[in-house]
Image (cartoon, rainbow, N blue to C red):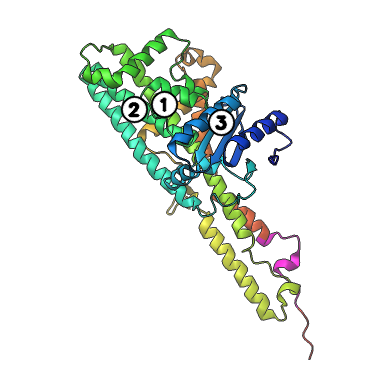
């Protein structure tokens, strides 16, 4: 039986995609296939996330071979497969990758016996986001600890062990990013391997150490060998300038780590808001004369009281971004301008100043020292996104339904005349 494949009208090369999927589902026991288009920062034109039945380890390699053979002629297509067990486990421990990439909008194929709503129907989205934030904080604390260790060794001029600590800093930054951007981490200790792994998804993360630059390649090679040689070999040498260059790379990667994590969490929060929005549609107090058979003024008063209570409840739930300032000064405190630590705060402030300098034509001499202009602009924009009051936007949507209904009788039905 021919596989039923659902593609939107905006998809390019639909016949190629249909042919690939049709071949795939005849060779592998596929439950679902999700496909999302690449954006400007992505290294692919389409990402295929394939969910298969749980399988013995010896079969996984065979599935990889099948996928590689099918997609070999289409290098712009990025494809990975996951078992149902992986999806459930990773989501439970706070990995938002599957929630962000496996939605009904991106589903192009599912088994005819499979309920497409089952995958996440029991998932508490708010709990996943909370767990994701907690886990990220723990991972980032480890990363910062390795970074501090590198600084201590640098003060002692012990460049070999400083390089080892920086290797751990960069490797853990990559593995943390990989879970949120790819779904699973890369099981290898070489920084070049992690860079290539993430570079298949995000272009700039594949160029942390640019391969076209000979000095950058030397740095990368020194970093790769630092994991083993700095501890066990007597002939491992690395210079002061090389270590400091790697130290700068580590700082930049930590800033990118936070930026990308924030972006993924924002996507998941948007899904939560959409889920909440759909869930509360049916809960709104919609009352008409026909539906509720209102016969007297007391019923109307009760209905208006219910509406007022709903407004108060929505206000309590969604007015979170600003808190009134008491005393002489009037105004509001901004509650949520989220940063994780001083490192991210200082990186954001530095990026903000760099963007301001870039905007001044007469300060051209200063802009020559700004090496990562795109990263600075992106960091500032990502921080600005945190200032958007998303909870209040949900509140406005619900209030529109409560207060500005097109049908005036929905909330305030006409009073019936009572006859003696």
Residue drawn where x is 52% and y is 46% of the image: 269
Which quadrant of the figure contains the C terminus?
bottom right
For marks 3 and 1, give the CA distance: 25 Å
Image location of residue 399, percent across then percent down? 63, 58
Within the image, what quadrant is residue 152 found in?
Answer: top left
Q: Nearer the viewer, residue 340 or 145?
A: 145
Residue drawn at (48%, 38%) of the image: 262
Tag 2's secondary structure?
helix
From the viewer's side, name the closer residue of 65 and 369. 65
> Relative to the observer, which residue lies in front, 182 or 313?
182
Q: Where is residue 24 in the image (x, y as percent from the top left)?
A: 61, 34
Of the numbered discs in the image, which one, if any, rests on residue 169? 2
Dot 2 and dot 1 residues touching (CB under 8 Å):
yes
- Residue at the spot of label 1: 253
Q: In this view, does 78 lie to the left or right of 94?
A: right
Q: How far apart in space, not on screen, are marks 2 and 1 (Cα)?
A: 9 Å
Give x and y (percent) for residue 395. 59, 54
- Which badge, 2 or 3, comes first in the chain's sequence? 3
In the depicted structure, whether residue 179 falls above or below residue 232: below
**First reached walking from the N terminus: tag 3 or tag 1:** 3
Instruction: Count residues near mark 2 (Cα–Cα under 10 Å), then give few for <14, some for 14-19, many for 20+.
Output: many
Q: What element carries label 1?
A: helix
Q: Can residue 348 be seen in the rendering of this structure? A: no
> How far is mark 2 from mark 3, CA to CA?
28 Å
Disc 3 crowd rating (10 Å Cα; few below 14, some 14-19, many 20+) is some
Which region of the structure is painted magenta?
402-415
């Amino acid at each position: 039986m021919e596989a039923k494949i659902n593609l939107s009208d905006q998809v390019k090369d639909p016949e190629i995609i249909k042919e690939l999927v049709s071949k795939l589902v005849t060779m592998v026991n596929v439950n679902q296939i999700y496909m999302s288009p690449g954006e400007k920062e992505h290294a692919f034109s389409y990402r295929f996330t394939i969910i298969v039945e749980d399988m013995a380890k010896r079969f996984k390699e065979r599935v990889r071979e099948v996928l590689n053979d099918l997609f070999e002629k289409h290098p712009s297509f990025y494809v990975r497969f996951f078992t149902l067990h992986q999806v459930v486990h990773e989501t439970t421990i706070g990995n938002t990758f599957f929630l962000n990439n496996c939605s009904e909008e991106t589903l192009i194929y599912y088994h005819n016996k499979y309920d497409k709503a089952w995958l996440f129907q029991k998932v508490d989205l708010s709990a996943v986001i909370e767990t994701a934030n907690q886990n990220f904080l723990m991972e980032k604390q480890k990363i910062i600890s390795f970074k501090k260790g590198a600084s201590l060794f640098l003060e002692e001029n012990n460049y070999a062990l400083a390089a080892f600590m920086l290797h751990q800093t960069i490797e853990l930054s990559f593995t943390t990013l990989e879970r949120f951007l790819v779904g699973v981490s890369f099981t290898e200790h070489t920084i070049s391997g992690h860079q290539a792994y993430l570079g298949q998804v995000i272009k700039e993360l594949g160029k942390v150490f640019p391969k076209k630059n000979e000095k950058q390649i030397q740095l990368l090679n020194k970093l790769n060998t630092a994991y083993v040689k700095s501890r066990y070999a007597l002939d491992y040498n690395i210079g002061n300038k090389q270590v400091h260059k790697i130290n700068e790379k580590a700082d930049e990667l930590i800033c990118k780590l936070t930026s990308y994590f924030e972006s993924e969490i924002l996507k998941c929060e948007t899904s939560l808001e959409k889920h909440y929005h759909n869930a509360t549609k049916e809960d709104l107090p919609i009352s008409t004369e026909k539906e509720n058979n209102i016969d007297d003024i007391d019923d109307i008063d009760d209905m208006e009281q219910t509406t007022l209570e709903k407004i108060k409840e929505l206000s309590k739930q969604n007015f979170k971004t600003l808190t009134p300032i008491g005393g002489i000064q009037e105004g509001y405190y901004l509650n949520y301008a989220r940063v994780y630590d001083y490192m991210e705060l200082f990186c954001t402030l530095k990026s903000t100043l760099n963007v301001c300098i870039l905007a001044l034509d007469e300060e051209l001499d200063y802009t020559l020292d700004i090496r990562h202009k795109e990263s600075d602009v992106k960091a500032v924009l990502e921080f600005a996104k945190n200032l958007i009051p998303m909870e209040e936007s949900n509140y406005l949507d619900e209030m529109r339904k409560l207060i500005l209904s097109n049908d005036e009788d929905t909330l305030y039905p006409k009073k019936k005349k009572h006859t003696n």
